Amino acid sequence: MNNSSILNSKIFKPLLISALFLLFCVKPTLSFSQEKAAEASEKPFDPKEVVFEHIGDSHSWPVAIPFMDEHFVSLPIILYTDKGLEVFSSGKLGFHHEEGHEATIYKGEHYSYKLEDKKVVAVDEAGEAIKDAKIYDFSITRNVISMWLGMIVLLIVFFSITSAYKKRVGKAPKGLQALLEPVILFVRDDVAIPNIGVKYVKYMPLLLTIFFFILINNLLGLVPFFPGGFNLTGNIAVTMVLSVIVLVVINFSGNKYYWKHIFTPDIPLWLYPIMVPVEIIGILSKPFALMIRLFANITAGHIIVLSLISLIFIFKTAWMATVSVPFVVFMDCIELLVAFLQAFIFTMLTSLFIGMAVEEHHH
Amino acid sequence: MDLVTPNLGLVVWTTISFAILLFLLGKFAWKPILGALNDRERFIEDSLSKAEAAKDEMARLTNENESLLKQARAERDQILSEARKVKEQMIVDAKELAHKEGARMIELARVEINNQKSIAMADVKNQVATLSLQIAEKVLRKQFEDHQKQDELVSQLLKEVKL
């Protein structure tokens, strides 16, 4: 009687869907816990390793495929060595979860390679690292792939709304266009115009691209499975590139007042030895602050969420989830806010700095 | 330390990717989108200012209409009052004229009557005179048929005449 009522009830379908969904999401975690449990006798659970595995970069992409043990997708490794270019699949080096066993050595054209601490190093026959081999790693890593995913999303979204603007000339915005138009207008009217002033038009493409690039990657970073599950905007290399671009833009748009303020400020001459170096440091410290702020905020959020999840495995009881999961949900809400906030702050400060560089002084 | 060491490969890929993204979005998305937004804002502003102008024009027209109406009303009142005045004047004039005419006609009638009367009187006088003369003649003839009587009368007349 109960069975039939459950099967016939209207909630059966949603239940089934949720169950499947849970299975898909939890599967990697479950297997991960089993794996860890199996290893527990040899090695205790190390949350630091788990957290850093996530927030760092990797040569393979972990994906959740139900009922299969392989949870990693190989990514191409591109090496520029002192002897020439080398391209091969990361699968040939084995995956990081096999660590603890002997690392797989792949014999390439120029050197033999193995993964050491998630980095590709050149090794000799005996498996010892060759110190004088110069290897520059330009691999398509997990973060590169995820960046491209984010870019594809951005391109699809904005090309579709561009066509909407072209098709619906003189009409009210609709759908996706109506959703994103206030955001675009926000960047223009509340970020660019108040900070930069009349010259804002030239900087709009950069500001909008920075804003949406950071935003989409922040948001995708919050999704725990495909197409998310990475830490791109919390990667120092990415934030560095963004802030170097900002640095270049600021200093190339700086007018004579900007440079005068740095090299010949209106102060007594004896203060110059102090002030000029301070101002020059200021040129670099502004983008540097941008780089660190974004990196630290996003990474910190990811670390907190992962630490809370790790608690379950540290205590080795599912009951811990009753504590962890609400906290994780709470953190995710905060991270959602932070995702928007950091994209906003980065764009805001960029336009503020550009505004300071292009400001006309009337003495 | 690994965390804060930028990875060269990722730096290169990020730079290339971001440059491509900036180019693609800048050329094919931001430019048309911002252009469309600007156009629409200008259109809205235009429409608003046009609406404002239309409203002003409307108000101006209404004002004009009202003043025209007021003027027309005043004119009508003035015309009416003038007409009334003219009417009264006319009545007064007509009365006076009628009065005068009446008086003149009466006067004429009186004069005519008088004339006719005097003519008639003169006529009557003549007839009376003629008649009296005829009567007197006849009487005299009758009286003076007898001689004695003539003497009596002469004597009487003589008696009456006192010298």
Image (tube, coloured by chain):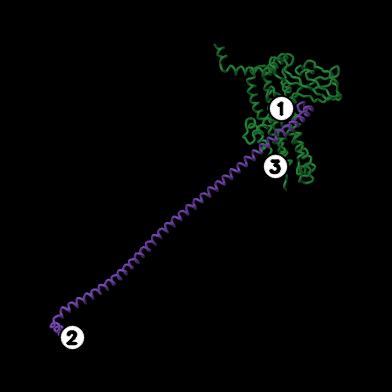
Chain colours: A green, B purple
Residue highlighted by disc 3: A198
Q: What is the CA distance from the residue labelled 1 to the residue labelled 3?
A: 32 Å
C-alpha distance separating marks 2 and 1: 174 Å
Q: Quadrant of the N terminus of chain A?
A: top right
Q: Farthest front residue? A: B145
User: Which element type, helix, strand or loop, lies under badge 3?
Assistant: helix
C-beta proximity under 8 Å, tags 2 and 1: no
User: Which numbered mark, 2 or 1, is in the foreground of this view?
Assistant: 2
Q: Position of residue A157 (x, y in %)?
A: 68, 29
With B131 as the anchor, is A303 left or right in this view?
A: right
In this view of the protein, can residue A299 be seen by the observer?
no
Q: Which residue is mark 1?
A: A152
Q: Label 2 sits on what residue type? A: Val
Residue A288: mark in rendering: none
Chain on which label 3 sits = A
Question: B17 or A141: nearer the eye?
Answer: B17
The x, y position of residue A278, in whole percent, is: 77, 39
Q: CA distance from mark 2 to mark 3?
A: 153 Å
Horizontal side of residue B124 vs A82, given as left or right: left
Which mark is in front, 2 or 3?
2
> Residue A90: x percent and y percent?
78, 20
Identified by mark 1, the residue type is Ile
Relative to B38, does residue A25 appear above or below in the rendering? above
